[in-house]
Amino acid sequence: MRLATLSRSIRICSLGVVLFGLLGLVSAASARAEVIFDSITGNTATGSTTATVNGWKAAQFILPAASGDKTKFGLGSVVLNLVNNPLATNFTVEIYDSTGGTSKPNSRIGELVATQPIVVGNNEFFTPSNFPNLNAASSYWVVLKGGASSPQWGTAGNSGLISPVSQQGTSTALTNNGGTSWLSNPAANNPSMMTVNAVAVPEPSTWAMGLAGLGFAGFKVLGRRRRQG
């Protein structure tokens, strides 16, 4: 009898865990990527900057502030306006965090991969490959590195638009020595054209508390049935 009761309680706990997981999946599916930086919409490329093997180019974006239990962001996609036709395997697009003062790239976080063949003049989509979550209210950089080909990144000129308005002061950066030292300039003067999308991610502790609550409920059922037996 006790074995049957224990088995039933375990099934209740397991069902609760499964339901909680399904709720998590539904929540994640309903969470939509939001545009956290955009210098493409409303702009037309009026020039470009070329990325070479050592002459890397970078553009800054800043994640929104934390909201409730959502203190991290999962990077969804990055769109770059490339105005020439380099082969996708001959250059790299990476994400860097910021150095002190947030004014320059610091350490590489991971690489982005193209989701389709590169086409002249198109806005090209790149997605994360084995990426960690990014911190809310923190500054990061999209870094374009040339290889066997030298991609040309479209720029919008002095009248370029940047949204949200709070990011008008973000910067562009360049290095002619493979990342050893960076020079930065306000992007509002000559913004590199890109769009960054991300999804807010709840703290892991939120999921842990829910699972603990389900486990506690299951053991309460077990204890009640033991007393009744």
Image (cartoon, helix red, strand yellow):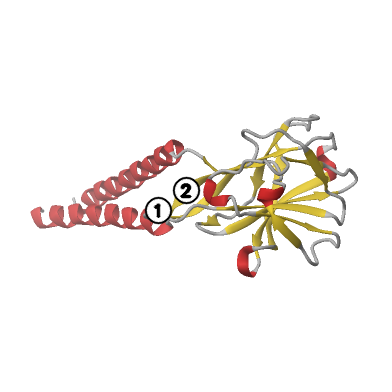
Circle 2: residue type: Ala
The residue indicated by pointer 1 is 67
Image mark for residue 193: none
Density class for disc 1 (Cα within 10 Å; few <14, some 14-19, many ≥20) is few
Circle 1: residue type: Ser
Write the residue at 62% across / 34% down: 41
Vertical placement of 134 versus 123: above or below? below
Q: What number of labels is visible?
A: 2
The quadrant holding residue 161 is top right
Vertical placement of 45 versus 139: above or below? above
Density class for disc 2 (Cα within 10 Å; few <14, some 14-19, many ≥20) is many
For discs 1 and 2, the disc positioned in front in the rendered view: 1
Using the image as rendered, state which of residue 51 and residue 25 is in the foreground. 51
Image mark for residue 200: 2
Q: Position of residue 66 (x, y in %)?
A: 44, 56
Write the residue at 78% across / 48% down: 92
Horizontal side, residue 173 vs residue 51: left or right: left
Q: Position of residue 137 (x, y in %)?
A: 51, 58
Q: Position of residue 220 (x, y in %)?
A: 19, 56
User: CA separation, marks 1 and 2?
Assistant: 9 Å
The quadrant holding residue 223 is bottom left
- Residues under numbered marks 1 and 2 in contact, where contact means CB atoms less than 8 Å apart: yes
Horizontal side, residue 137 vs residue 154: left or right: left
Using the image as rendered, state which of residue 212 and residue 74 is in the foreground. 74
Vertical placement of 196 versus 139: above or below? above
